[in-house]
Amino acid sequence: MNDFDRPLNDRGNKDAPMMAKRLFDKNIKIELFVSSPAVRALTTAKFFFQEYKAKKEQLVEVKDLYHAPPAVFYGLINQLDDKYDCVAFFSHNPGITEMVNSLGVAKVDNLPTCSVFGVHADIKSFKDFQKANKQFWLFDYPKLVQ
């Protein structure tokens, strides 16, 4: 089976809903879920989508997120509707780790599978995100003791 079509393993099917619930229970209000269409990323996004009881139009698949470098993330962020305050991206390593490190708020060697990393940005428009001042918000992953 090729990488794109590989499903979540048993651990992923346990960890993804657990992480979705952790974020939901922290009252983090995700309004848009943007995912690579690869099976593992999209399945993970759907667990979050279900936990948040989101509407169909709040889940967007973007082919370019499959193994995307930071430039792709920034391009997508630039296109986001400014009506959103909190957007979650679901993608793959090594690109997602590179993206996190490009934010300039923390140095992460490798984002563990199903980890969540967040920043706050002082912006009025997503077009300003890349150059904006950002503050570390959260970093959580399945094996992190709560």
Image (cartoon, rainbow, N blue to C red):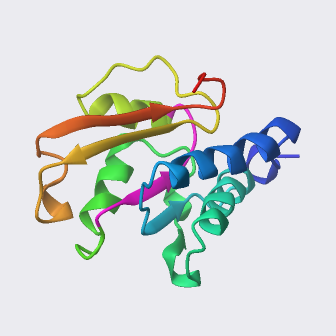
> Residue 104 or 121: which is nearer the viewer?
121
Answer whether residue 86 is magenta in the image.
yes
**Overall secondary structure of the magenta section:** loop
Q: Residue at x 63, y 39 (%)?
A: 114
Drawn side of residue 62 relative to residue 142, left or right = left
Location of residue 142 with respect to 51 vertically, above or below: above
Q: Residue at x 47, y 48 (%)?
A: 26
Range of residues picked out in magenta: 85-94
The answer to which image quadrant residue 27 occupies is bottom left
Q: Residue at x 12, y 50 (%)?
A: 122
> Residue 41 or 19: which is nearer the viewer?
19
Q: Position of residue 29 (x, y in %)?
A: 41, 62
> Residue 38 or 54: which is nearer the viewer?
54
The answer to which image quadrant residue 137 occupies is top left
Quick check: can you spot residue 90? no
Location of residue 56 with respect to 80 vertically, above or below: below
Q: Residue at x 56, y 75 (%)?
A: 54
- Figure quadrant of the C terminus: top right
The answer to which image quadrant residue 9 occupies is top right
Answer whether residue 31 is magenta in the image.
no
Q: Position of residue 60 (x, y in %)?
A: 52, 72
Quick check: can you spot residue 5? yes
Q: Position of residue 33 (x, y in %)?
A: 50, 64
